[in-house]
Image (tube, helix red, strand yellow):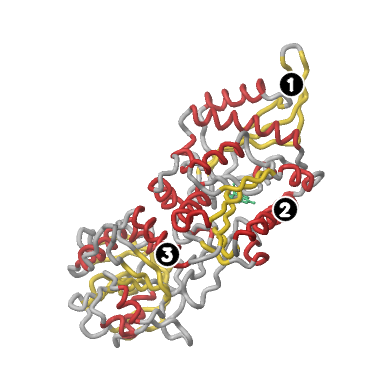
Amino acid sequence: MSTSSGIIVLDFGGQYTQLIARRIREHHVRSAILPFNTPVEELRQRAPEGIVLSGGPSSVFEEGAPHSDPAILQMGVPVLGICYGQQLISHQLGGTVRPAPTREYGRAHLEVVEKSALFSNVPAQLPVWMSHGDNVEKLPAGFRLTARTGSALGAIEDAARKIYAVQFHPEVRHTAHGEQILANFLFEVCHAKPDWVPQAFIEQTIKEIQEKVKDGIAICALSGGVDSTVAATLVHRAIGDRLHCVFVNNGLLRKNEFGSVTATMRRLGLNLIPVDATERFLKKLEGVSEPEKKRKIIGNEFIEVFEEESKKLARLGNVDWLVQGTLYPDVIESVSVRGPSAVIKSHHNVGGLPETMRMKLIEPLRELFKDEVRRVGADLGLDPELIGRQPFPGPGLAVRVLGDVSAEKLELLREADAIVQEEISAASLYESIWQSFAVLLPVRSVGVMGDQRTYGYTIALRAVHSEDGMTADWVRLPYEVLERISNRIVNEVRGISRVVYDITSKPPGTIEWE
Ligand code: XMP
């Protein structure tokens, strides 16, 4: 399937660049982000249907402020400048840009004052989101003002040359009708074709990986979660059995997880190396109760196991490539991902690996958001259960057994947690909840069962709604569900005598207890 060339977003370092690209994809139009200084010849070769100049933190006058090639504005390709993009267009086409007397951040009121393709089907007055400090004072020749906000030019355009610019951010949800404004640019101005679907992403990504990974062996640490599985499946489709997937049982997985993940990965045809390293991990964790220390031990041990496996693979060829399921939200915000001035900071789930092992990274999902990854996973044919899996932390149950970890405590937690999962699923709540799980507290309390006095541990039940794990609210679980979970845990898990429900949101709490 071949798709249209789509829209190119030139990145000037704005915090919303990825969001612009994502919003374009939401309209099923392909989008790619390139650095602001991409040569005009390269853009011509790509023959985009349109170009967006992103926002950015700079001021066009600043020494070293990023400037794209002015020839881009002569290509005859429709252009939309957003925020900094508007100032740059004005500056490059002979308008005047001045530092604004009052800076506008946050909500502003936009008034559409002239008919414009950009504002078709958009009300004349609307709230928009601004964040800028410079103003366009005099319009470049050929431009007209189509919308204004209190102290700034809201939108300007030269429809004959198909150059449009807005001072506000149509890509953020706080801008009412932002979606419609972007759609107007895509379809009314660029006449872009809405043929970008997950299948197109899959084919494109496979092609790119094949071009990049011409030889050598690639290795991937599978966790059984949706991100690493989708990443591995894509790479496997591209380079076949040159990809080796290591799945480590660190002894901190949930009930039956090692077996079921192994079976799923085999079913997917992945070249799997399951490693049961339970004893090594538990030995290293003995007597350790400080959460960050636990995390460090687990991370280091993981690297050792992974390195050992990659050394074993060296007999088959050079292990040059490391596949990671890094998503866009893992790439720390507010730094430009592609811009040349960018410091790229990745959150590596397998912390420290690239440095010690000197491998080149393949991160096919680094521009996607979680829900986009899930859609790609569905199109790759992955099981709905796998795609819908709630996130599970790398250090696993070690951060849910509070204090020191032992095989016995892990066993108690596993049993209690399995009951939580069963009951949440039985109540058809699993998919709508971000995370639901049990935590084992090192607190014992007295109970009575039959005629026996009991003195067992406490399980804290945690269930939260969240968009991205950054903030969260506790789930108002129905009393009947709470009741069933509590009854079953106390009755079925010997050694637990009490169940409590955590009603703390994040902030001020965190999702995990450690
Ligand atoms: P907190 O507890 O910080 O968790 O509110 C936010 C999200 O991150 C997960 N989490 C981790 N994931 N390694 C991981 O891979 C970790 O050390 C870790 N700690 C927390 C947590 O499950 C939640 O989704």
The relative height of residue 198 versus residue 362 in the rendered view (above or below) is: above
Q: Residues within 10 Å of mark 2 (few under 14, many from 20)?
A: some
Q: Do the residues under discs 1 and 2 have CB atoms within 8 angstroms?
A: no
Closer to the N terminus: mark 3 or mark 1? 3
Tell me if 258 is positioned left or right of 495 in this view. Answer: left
Closer to the N terminus: mark 1 or mark 2? 2
Amino acid identity at mark 3: Glu
Image coordinates of residue 63 in percent, x first then y, are 48, 87
Q: Residues within 10 Å of mark 1 (few under 14, many from 20)?
A: some
Q: Which residue reaches farthest right?
A: 287
Tell me if 217 is positioned left or right of 441 in this view. Answer: left
Residue 510 visible in the current orientation: no
Residue at screen point 57% across, 51% down: 245
Label annotation for residue 447: 1
Image coordinates of residue 193 in percent, x first then y, are 24, 61
Label annotation for residue 208: 3
Q: Nearer the viewer, mark 3 or mark 2?
A: 3
